[in-house]
Amino acid sequence: MGCSACSWLYPFSPMTMASSTLGQPLHKPIFFKPITAISCSMVGPTSSSSSSSTGSYGTGCSNPIRRHLPLSTSYDTPPEILRHWIELQQPQASQDRFTVASYNILGDRNASKHKDLYLNVPSDYIRWGYRKRVLCEEIMRWNPDIICMQEVDKYFDLRNTMEKAGYVGSYKRRTGDNVDGCATFWKPSKFRLLETESIEFKGFGLRDNVAQLSVFEMCRDESRRLVAGNIHVLYNPSRGEVKLGQIRSFSSRAQELSNRWGNAPVVLGGDFNSTPQAAIYKFLSTSELNIKLYNRRELSGQRSCHPSQVLGANSELNSFTVLDKLLNDCWTDEEVKAAAGTANSDFVMHPLQLSSSYATVKGSTNTRDSNGEPLATSYHSKFLGTVDYLWYSEGILPIRVLDTLPIDTLRRTGGLPWKKIGSDHLALVSEFVFSKRNEDDKPGTAVLRSD
């Protein structure tokens, strides 16, 4: 609907959005002041009333999964899919809690286009009609207040269902010929939307990926504000410089919004297409990276996470990866500029101090690696590993997370989607609490930008 490079915005003031009902006339569209490579996004009405562990970073995937596998496993019966909440602590009773989910839901077009990834998946589990029902059942069971979805190409179909459950949605389609994008849903009964922006990385020369940023305030307490980001980083495992550039630009814009809205805390969800053992993870968790120390083609760690490699079943694939690492891969000025924003620096930096919610709320070694991250958030015939994260800044603290699944359970499915899992990714869900109050953060300190 409409061109992929631009979408519409129907903004609501905190008062009008909270009281809007489905079927009422929309307000006259107001467009935010344009920012370089940032465009407006579409918002629809509804009918409803601690630091992460850095560990040791390499340029590839170190197979932390292999040591968690049983020596022999019977696959005669289908696995039982059970996900449990893990709590960091039990804080005092507070109404200033909120739950955020991040979910790459597998675009319908991608599922059809890349059938080689799902050869072991029953065809019924791939059909969009079935997956949409399972996806929505999963989401409603977790009852998140904010949902960051990636790879969405059936937005209006999803929005109809989400509206009935009390959510409002915004959507940004990727640029170019792509039909999927990012969608953010939230409960207007919990949060008021103050501002929203969509980033088109094409404007920075960083491919057709997009991201969303939303500024919210809690309905019960206007001083509790939050910047929520949603991103789907470029997949291409060999283009580490583009991945770094996208994350750098995304983080910088999130920081600018945070500053404008009283230093509001930030939570960033998405598919970052990088593993916990890779250099890009180090960049996210430490805010800087000397890129000249790394092979550009190995920055994300994805190239070593084929299931055959991770599970130790095929040594030939590992030999190809080792050979590739030995190839000379010097950085060009153009690649350095894409990663760092300038060709005159060996360092890539972003302004946020981020921690991972899953690395903060430690889990069992059955589901977590040495960083505390899930052993796997995505599984199909060509990938088994973690690429999805929920990052947060100072001012909020995760108090519990929905744990992922043991590797032996995933392995027994033969690949995702599965009967009770609607995507080839697992959703990440974290409950946060505001950890401090800024005395200078008062209602009305920032205004909605418009032309």
Image: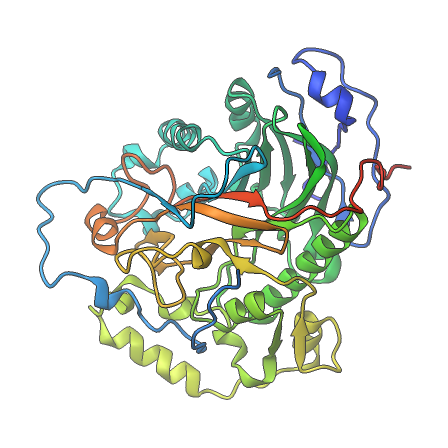
**The N terminus sits in image quarter:** top right
In this view of the protein, which residue sits in the foreground, 177 or 241? 241
Residue at 22% x, 70% y is: 312
Instruction: Say if 276 sits above or below 184 in the image.
Output: below
Q: Measured from the top left, where is residue 60 in percent x and y?
A: 41, 74
Q: Tell me, yes or no, if residue 215 can be seen here.
A: no
User: Is 175 on the left-hand or right-hand side of 93?
Assistant: right
Extreme-front residue of the structure? 92
Residue at 32% x, 64% y is: 306
Q: Measured from the top left, where is residue 158 in percent x and y?
A: 51, 28
Q: Tell me, yes or no, if residue 201 can be seen here.
A: yes
Instruction: Say if 371 sits above or below 78 in the image.
Output: below
**The C terminus sits in image quarter:** top right
Residue at 64% x, 59% y is: 207
Q: Measured from the top left, where is residue 308 in percent x and y?
A: 25, 65
Q: Measured from the top left, where is residue 76 in percent x and y?
A: 8, 44
Instruction: Say if 48 sits above or below 11 in the image.
Output: above
Q: Which colour scheme is used?
A: rainbow
Instruction: Say if 91 sits above or below 334 in the image.
Output: above
Extreme-right residue of the structure? 451
**Count of labels shown?**
0
